[in-house]
């Protein structure tokens, strides 16, 4: 890892969107569990981006795997600073609007991913009560086919989009380096942060730049913290 001088670290964090109420760089936290690969140090993920939140949420994720009956192995929490200079979103909202994706990435991409995550759209109160309260549509795909002009009414939880490597790659290609949004689960009612490259991470205690690239784990088996 590459240790940073105070001056270099201040320069890297000078424009970050991850700040406290005073506008100073904010320390956020990531929880992980699973075997450590000493030959390839770094943060681990199976997903398209790395997630960060509060210390309490990170600690909970590290100690309590998402897989029932599984015991956390080598639980750990990383306090870090994040370099996010061009976030895809900064809304304190756990949902993603179709209109935002269409505006920033184009209509074809918005349609592609909202159809991919149709189940998350159909799991919203908006869908159940406002759009499909009388069950006239079999699902999002039929709704979009019959009423493409109403696509802007759709929204869904943001996290599956940011978990998706294809979506994250598109965001990176468009110049975005992260996202800030309202969390859910352990991070409910709290901000959650994503970065797409481990080079956007500075370890707060050691002042080291995180190694690049992060370890991309195979999809099989229990998940590490995203």
Image: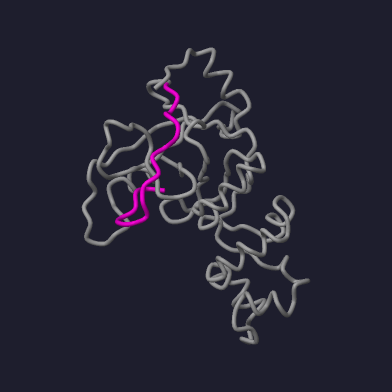
Q: Main secondary structure of the magenta part?
A: loop
Q: Quadrant of the N terminus?
A: top left
Percent x, y of residue 82:
51, 32
In the rendered image, which quarter is residue 215 located in?
A: top left
- Residue 221 colored in magenta in the image: yes
Q: Residue furthest right?
A: 149
Q: How many marks?
A: 0
In the image shown, does 117 or 14 lie closer to the viewer? 117
- Identify the residue at image location x=44%, y=35%: 213
Report x, y in % for residue 106: 73, 55
Relative height, residue 59 to residue 113 (above, below): above
- Nearer to the camera, 22 or 204: 204
Span highlighted in magenta in the image: 208-226
Q: Position of residue 138 (x, y in %)?
A: 60, 83
Q: Residue 185, image x and y in percent?
A: 43, 56
Give the colouring mode of the picture. Answer: one colour
Q: Tell me which corner region of the image, top left, top right, bottom left or bottom right, holds residue 108.
A: bottom right
**Left or right: where 34 falls relative to 19:** left
Q: Indicate yes or no whether the magenta region holds residue 113.
A: no
């Amino acid at each position: 890892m590459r240790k940073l001088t105070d001056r270099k670290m201040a320069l890297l964090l000078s424009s970050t969107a991850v700040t406290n109420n005073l506008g100073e760089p904010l320390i956020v936290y990531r929880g992980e569990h699973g075997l450590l690969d000493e030959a390839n140090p770094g943060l681990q993920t199976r997903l398209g981006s790395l997630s960060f939140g509060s210390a309490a949420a990170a600690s909970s994720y590290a100690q309590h795997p998402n897989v029932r009956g599984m015991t956390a192995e080598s639980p750990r929490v990383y306090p870090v600073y994040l370099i996010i200079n061009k976030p895809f979103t900064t809304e304190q909202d756990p949902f993603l609007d179709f209109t935002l994706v269409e505006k920033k990435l184009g209509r074809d991409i918005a349609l592609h991913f909202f159809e991919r995550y149709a189940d998350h759209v159909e799991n919203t109160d908006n869908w159940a009560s406002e759009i499909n309260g009388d069950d006239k549509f079999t699902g999002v795909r039929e709704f979009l086919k019959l009423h493409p002009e109403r696509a802007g009414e759709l929204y869904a939880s943001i996290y599956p989009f940011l978990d998706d490597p294809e979506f994250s790659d598109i965001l990176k290609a468009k110049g975005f380096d992260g996202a800030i949004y309202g969390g859910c689960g352990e991070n409910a009612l709290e901000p959650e942060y994503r970065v797409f490259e481990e080079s956007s991470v500075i370890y707060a205690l050691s002042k080291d730049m995180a190694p690049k690239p992060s370890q991309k784990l195979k999809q099989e088996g229990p998940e590490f913290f995203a």
